[in-house]
Image (spheres, coloured by chain):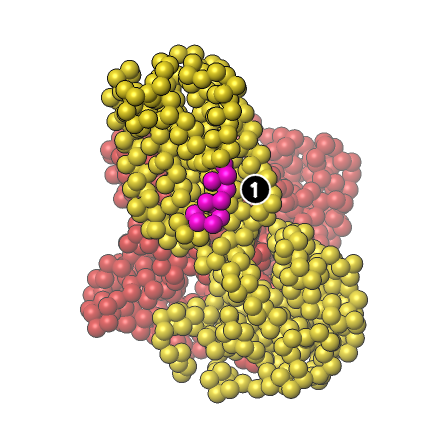
Chain colours: A yellow, B red
Amino acid sequence: MDDPRTAPAGPLGAGTGVLLIAVFTIATCGLIYELLAGTIASYLLGDSVTQFSTVIGAYLFSMGVGSYLSRHVRRDLLIRFIEIEILVGLVGGLSSPALFFAFAEVDAFRVVLYGWVFVTGVLVGLEIPFLIRILKDEFPLHDLVSRVLSLDYLGALAASLLFPLWLVPQVGLMRSSFVFGGLNVLVAVWTCHYFRRRHRRPRLTAQAYGALAVLGLGALFSDDLTAWSERRLYEDPVVLSRSSPYQRIVLTRGGDGVRLFLNGNLQFSTLDEYRYHEALVHPGLAAVAAPRRVLVLGGGDGMAVRELLKDERVEEVTLVDLDPMMTDIFRDHEAFATLNGHALRSPRVEIVNADAFVWLESNADRYDFIVVDFPDPRTYSLGKLYTTTFYRRLAGRLNTGGAAAIQSTSPLVSRRAFWCVVETVRAAGLHARPYHAPVPTFGEWGYVLASPEPLALSDAFPPGLRYLTPAVARSLFEFPADMAPVPVEVNQLNNQILVRYHAEGWQQYADGRPVTHP
Amino acid sequence: MSRRRIPWSRGLTRRDMLRMGPGAAAAMALGCAPGLPASAERALDAGRIAGAVVGASHRQGHLLRDGARPEPRQVRDVRVAIVGAGVAGLSAAWKLARSGMRDFAVLELEADAGGNARWGANDVSAYPWGAHYLPVPTAEATATRELVAEMGLVLDTGPDGEPVYDPRHLCHAPQERLFVDGGWREGLSARDVVNPAPGSAEAAELAAFEAEMRRYRDYRDARGRRAFALPVAAGSADAAVAGLDGMSMREYFDRAGWSSRRLRWYVDYCCRDDYGCTLETTSAWAGWHYFCSRPDDVEYLTWPEGNGRIVRHFLDRVGGNVLPGMLVYRVRPTASAGGGGVSGGSVSGGNVPAGIVPAGGVSPGPVSSGGLPGAGLPIGGASTGPVSQGAFPGGRPPDGVLPAGVVPAGAVPADGVEVDALDTRTETAVRFRARHCIYALPRFTAPHVIDGYALAGLESFTYSPWVVANLTVDRPPDGAAWDNVLHDSPSLGYVVATHQDLRTVPGPSVLTWYLPLAVPNPDAARAWMLAQEWRDWASLILADLVQAHPDIESRVSRIDVMLWGHAMIRPVPGFIRGEARRRAAAPHGAIRFAHSDMSGISVFEEAQYHGVRAAEEVMRALGHAHATSL
Ligand SMILES: Cc1cc2nc3c(=O)[nH]c(=O)nc-3n(C[C@H](O)[C@H](O)[C@H](O)COP(=O)(O)OP(=O)(O)OC[C@H]3O[C@@H](n4cnc5c(N)ncnc54)[C@H](O)[C@@H]3O)c2cc1C
């Protein structure tokens, strides 16, 4: 079949063999594009069942659209076929980089995703009808249909085996996309070449070579492209990513578990979040005699609520988190709701989506225990949640004998920031009991217990804890020399000194300079 | 981007520009700065940015100019008539009410009370139209301390005996930043701005400047008074201090040999900010007063509506006595009128407050048609838009009681005052007969309004015009402080109205942009200002802000502009120590004066001081027992 002169009878001669190989190739490529789109969508958006179903559905539908449209093309079928191959090669070949880029840069990622899937599908849908019509004079119809379709399904089988076994693990999404796009264009080049005498189209040939060059370069540099796109994203594959009006929520899943990032900052890793949350909740909760009504500020991931619900004395928990998207994900997404033991679906829990400061101002209820789990005071906006004004308001919501547990950044990394929280709590007229716990993914972490009356600590923890034991709990209140108190100013709305302390500490830490305190 | 000529400069001759001086020329240059992107022009042309010039309607002025010489047909008796509901007039009312005296009326031209401390509001936020903050009052500002305590701003008393303020009302961090050399820098102290290289000549100059500042701050005269105090009246009269008024701040700098460009810019900025004057036109006394009357680390009290919050507090107390929409066009000392003589009677006219009676036979004589202010009358002519703050009195004030004593005031009849005002809503004139009048309008108006009033040297009261714009934006600029100053601009930058918002994630906001027309000839600048249209202001403002915020035009949905013709008294050299200013406080018959003008510096404490002082004088004259706030 390499030589047109030895070709079988029929107007295309030996070209028929070429075209049948083309069927196999384009079938493989077509399915690869579909799998790529489905995989990337699941990586970036999470919930792979939904992503795969919708991508496959959209793809098949648009192929149907392509097949339907094919009837409108009457003349120069071979030329149109070559053009389509070049286009499919480019669109399909650039799908990975385009989707990764769109995810990082474009708000309406889904529009780009399904648009891309649709265009690819329409083009792929045109291919087989064209080929059948081109080949219709070479074979009897029953023979033609059986040959073309069997090759088509064979190509699909090849793709479905190659993709998970070799392409994703060895070649990578980025390079696979370029390589298969290139194969599609090769079909065009090859076809041009074989039918060059009957259809001399030097421009078309040049276009095909041009497309091949683009995809070849892409394949060559796809490691760099991948590195670039991952640098823009995260260490581990992203399993869910959402942008709410308040923040960007990203969940990744890797070898050591699920991690939650808010605006790029790690909030927890399932590897050790139980340490963080047990230490946040239980020392304070145990110290309160009758913690019936509990308030959680921040902490929309529901992990702190999970800890609270372990204690049977807790009758009702009100969770106030700014972002409904956060609480929805951790209540309704099976994969993430399991992380908090479906705490947010408990009848004991009420979820309020509101700004904590404003909500505290407008709400007059009192609570026995309050968990304050805000992001670190990285910005002036967040710093407001660590001021005397905020803690005074908090004090006004505590029943006598009640207490609040406040996450207070790392006393090792940002020693001044930690002790500033302690002093600010005191300046707001509350008693403060600082403590800390080691959380490997975070480092040494700090907390403050704040209470209107001095607190008597207790060891009566609920069963089912993985980290806290009475002896460990007692040790948390001891501060080693390198985390001991330092003189600090009180954080006020009008000075926001804490934001500066925090930035200093973490900057020095990032720079690798020793953290020194005058 | 194109360097385009501002179209509205066409009507202006070169001579006009020269007369207006460099400041206004610079302001106009804003419009042709190479900064306004074509997209911003398109946004304005396409009407994507809405807005209006508010407060330059002059409707009320025309009522008078168009030949209407209103004859009051109604008379109302009140014990005290307060003219003008700015901070001074409202403070007088506040003091009277606080002392248990309720038979007074406050007559205000505008639909809303507050004067330079008025405010507006839209769906996004309340915002100031003028005064936007009150520095934490110093010990001398006793009346202001009394006021802020009454407002509930003080949490308790610190170990040093000083009040501890609720941090919610103190300006939150970050307070100030400066756009300079293409980037923002936090802080706006002399040191932040000059930022000298250690050991440089500039560092030495800055140190000398700071030392001078400390010297004046620490100064105490033989009577223990500080060199510069708030109110001004509580400061030292020593020649060493008063003498500073003989030169400009610029001359002071020249004599000291301070040449640092940054330091001069900084002090010039401060003068523009506080007085609407430049380094050249501010007296050295006023310049140092700005730096030395308050402690180094002074904090500011501020709210979304600025000092409008304080006005609201006043209105809570005395709003029922404030009559808005009342253009006072004539005030006349009388020998016969008096509170308590006639009162009650029928109410006529939809909006006429209770207590007004038809002027029939009870009116003491015909209304003089002379002395009508006409076009020369200073009309604030501004309305703040959607929010209406002032209120007509709900009921009839108690009848006045005849005074126990009468203040002698030379040849001028001193036992009564007639105040004629045009109710701009019904366009009917009303005469208020009062025992006493507190005149709290800007002082330059007095000869136009008060019968037979003359004050030698009154022409030395000059005023800087200001432009204030409120821009509604989809969110505050990244890293915005409360006060955001532009180094290379005749404007003062902008203040963020939602800065005190406690929400963690900021929503839409309003930016209040300030432009003092700090030029040698304010009259020409005023005329230029009044000739501009909204489109002119909008592109001028955007061109100013675009240097620091390239995307500003896509963030702004509305620009409203307020033109203040006589915004601030100018403390030019010689004014503070001048005869006219000192004599201006002398009463005219039963008329007492209260306005920040008389301090020579336009700040809240001064306005309040004069209002409270005048109220106490009136109560003394009436024999009304009261505790002094001064
Ligand atoms: C743009 C701007 C910003 C400022 N910012 C600050 C600041 O941040 N902090 C600060 O302390 N000070 C600030 N000031 C200074 C401010 O002027 C004083 O704080 C104070 O508000 C002045 O009050 P006043 O009563 O003396 O005068 P005005 O406010 O001038 O009061 C005079 C009143 O008389 C009324 N009136 C005029 N003519 C008539 C008439 N014919 N009949 C009836 N009523 C009439 C006016 O409408 C007005 O209400 C600012 C001023 C301006 C213009």
**Residue at image location 47% in from the left, 35% down from the top:** A155
Q: Quadrant of the N terminus of chain A?
A: top left
Tell me residue A183's x, y (percent): 36, 35
Query: Visible in this render: residue A188?
Result: yes
Tell me residue B599's x, y (percent): 45, 58
Name which quarter of the figure residue B210 lies in: bottom left
**In-image side of B273 versus B350 (left or right):** left
Q: Is residue A423 above or below residue A203?
A: below
Query: Visible in this render: residue B276?
Result: no
- Between B459 and A18, the one lying in front of the other is A18
Name which quarter of the figure residue B228 lies in: bottom left
- Residue density around tag 1, few if under 14, some if 14–19, many if 20 or more, within 10 Å: many
- Between B294 and B551, the one lying in front of the other is B551
**Residue at image location 47% in from the left, 40% down from the top:** A159
**In-image side of B34 versus A504 (left or right):** left
- Between B618 and A185, the one lying in front of the other is A185
Q: Which residues are magenta?
A: A156-167
Disc 1 marks a residue whose amino acid type is Phe
Q: Is A162 inside the magenta-drawn segment?
A: yes
Kindly report the secondary structure that dominates the magenta region of the rendered protein. Answer: helix
